[in-house]
Amino acid sequence: MEKIYRWQSTGLQAGEKLVGIESFIKDKRRKKDILVMGHVVCGYPSFEENFSALEIMEDAGVDLVELQFPFSEPSADGPLFVKANEMSIKSGTTVNMCFEFMSKVTKRFSFKVLMMGYYNTIFQLGEEAFLSRLKDSGGEGYIIPDLPVEEATKLHTLSRDLDLDPIILMTQTSSDDRLKKLGESSRGMVYAVARKGVTGSKTTMDESIDSLISRCRANTSVPLGVGFGISSKSDLDFLKGKADVAIIGTAALQAWETSHANGYKNFFESLQIS
Amino acid sequence: MDIFDFSDGREGYYGEYGGVFLPEILHETIEELLQCFRECKSDPGFWQEYESVLQSYSGRPTPITYLENLSRHLGGAQIYVKRDDLNHTGSHKVNNVVGQGLLCKRLGKKRVIAETGAGQHGFATATMAAKFGYDCRIYMGAVDVARQRPNVFWMENLGAEVISVEDGQKTLKDAVNECMRDWVTNMSDTHYILGTACGPHPFPEMVSWFQSIIGKEARKQLLELTGNLPDRVYACVGGGSNAMGIFQGFMEDPSVELIGCEAGGKGVGSYMHSARLAYDDAKVGVAQGYKTYFLQNDDGNMSETHSVAAGLDYIGINPIFSYLWEQGKVRFEAATDEEVKEALKLVMRTEGLIPALETTHGFVTAIKEAPTLGKNEIILINQSGRGDKDIFTIADALNDSKWKKFIDGKAQDYRLERN
Ligand SMILES: Cc1ncc(COP(=O)(O)O)c(C=O)c1O
């Protein structure tokens, strides 16, 4: 079992060794003020287009990517991702195809890959089978928005043995007691949800984000990603020095929807990541 | 056996079914709801107020009717019907809605949202919201909006905003997803009035508790009327709230057999149905906040469901039933669309009753089994709703030429009015 390391904003102490996402982020943060995590919905618009999107992200200096496995009831997602999930399933995307795609992606690119999806996908496969497929496909961890920590005990224990990271969400509505409990389960990185609601609409970067970040910080030592409504360089600038990772979802897909690969490229370039 | 005693198990679990599978952002909201519900459940004054509102507003207790003609016609068991169709708004849905409306006052919330399939739950919610002074928004799948226009008309005229949901299969499950999305955004002033005994804990327990009023009344009334308990109790099962309601009156009576009737749609092997337990097509999964049997594929994506009755057209079943079924405490059967149409005609002609298409699923199974029982045996059917709302669907099904002519005439009038 690895030791729990305390981390300060100054970065890793010399000689410290961490595994998984946590070490990756801390290492990179020595050279970068803020990392960026991108997102694609597997199979939407198509796996080929996913791949082009990922090439653009790699070139732009994106550090981590969530590969969302489509689910028929994406109740935590906003309209654009709902449509993406639905269209992907309609076009025949299966869980198996998503894992195969993940293998291809982790071999080809330098960014780290997380699985994002809903719990039923894991439940149907079986927790152990899911984790071993994830490991074999080169994934580093997973984000499951509809799996509260109370229901995740076994999955989290199994993950630890495989050095896979369960990314836990912390939110503005979480009480201090709840954040403490979430903090105790956190590994790899924590996903701070910047506002109420579903994915999609723009979030105003203001004191409420500062307060969310400091409440999260007080309850976990792992790196902090902030997501939901992050869409511009100024959002990234706002988060610099406060969070470790800016998580970008809908804004990028929006760019692809309106102007495809070119628009996507412009969008990521405008973020001036590296 | 108290299925709601969680002291030696996990809170909110019935065997391996139930639980809370919600986004983290709703954690405090669902805790607050659970807390408030526990307070209401342990406060006798709350139940008294609940009963008295239903009495003055909805005509409770609803009576039991003896179906003498149908019993004679079938030549077997004596058939009795619990008349929850006589409620205000025409179905049992109003019980749960009034209960949650009163609870919402204690929560101090000003706005309510609800999903609806047949429109009965939405209709009842809109009515209650008007009476109690809540802002009200109803989510309804576009397919259901198209087939249940009369209820949409009433909801809108009662002051509710009806949102037609265009995602997914555009039916009940998609309306539930939209409610979840609204709730994760507006939880601070909004209560989600889930319409059936599904979803995350405490909804299955809470909705069952409010609906238990049906079974409490029915047991007492039937004993007064016949001196006996029923041998079998039948109820249709969508999410399972009316069935939980009537069954709870007889859970402690080992001689009473409980039969849940699901939507067989186009039948076994058609994959065009909503029978989770009666057919072999569903398996255990997690969606819409809870664990139960769902109609889904190997990847865990939900299957398309079908029923002539919008209120039964749903992927999952209340987790309490998954458990009771496994324990052999409730038997599940399915009725097909065709059988439902035939049974509806028979019940209308012999008894002058017009059960809702949902409800008629319970009648189908009872009608099949009544002749196999003795004349001294008693059957009780829960008439969860009345069929007036289904006039368009039923007229279609019966291919009523005079109705079609009437609609055609109306359409022409409207066209002239526009020009
Ligand atoms: C009249 C009627 N009965 C039954 C149902 C099914 O719901 P449940 O199984 O929760 O009783 C509905 C749902 O809309 C309904 O309108």
Image (tube, coloured by chain):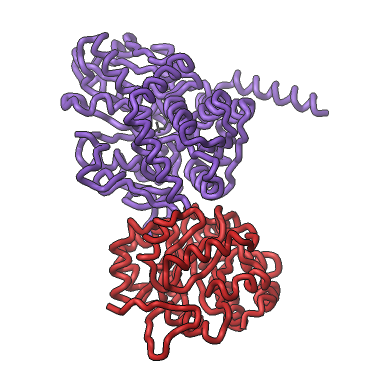
Chain colours: A red, B purple
Q: For the C terminus of chain B, give its image quadrant.
A: top right
Question: Eyeballing the image, is B88 above or below A39?
Answer: above
Q: Residue furthest bottom?
A: A15
Question: Eyeballing the image, is B60 above or below B327?
Answer: above
Q: For the N terminus of chain B, give its image quadrant.
A: top left
Question: Eyeballing the image, is B110 above or below A110?
Answer: above
Ligand 1 positioned in quadrant: top left
Question: Eyeballing the image, is B260 above or below A164?
Answer: above
Task: Count up the numbered dots.
Answer: 0
Q: Is residue B361 visible?
A: yes
- Picture residue at 22% right of the left edge, 34% below the top: B2
Q: Could you say where residue B334 lies in the image, as x and y percent from the top left?
A: 33, 35
Q: Quadrant of residue B223?
A: top left
Q: Could you say where residue A272 lies in the image, as x and y percent from the top left?
A: 66, 79
Q: Residue furthest left?
A: B254
Q: Which is nearer the eye, A199 or B337?
A: A199
Q: Residue furthest right?
A: B419
Q: Is residue A110 left or right of residue B327?
A: right
- Picture residue at 32% right of the left edge, 11% below the top: B66
Q: Which is nearer the eye, B95 or A90?
A: B95
Q: Which is nearer the eye, B151 or A177?
A: A177
Q: Could you say where residue B181 lies in the image, as x and y percent from the top left?
A: 53, 49
Q: Quadrant of residue A211?
A: bottom right
- Picture residue at 53% right of the left edge, 79% below the top: A63
Q: Which is nearer the eye, B171 or B244?
A: B244
Q: Could you say where residue B57 lies in the image, as x and y percent from the top left?
A: 48, 17
Q: Is residue B354 visible?
A: no
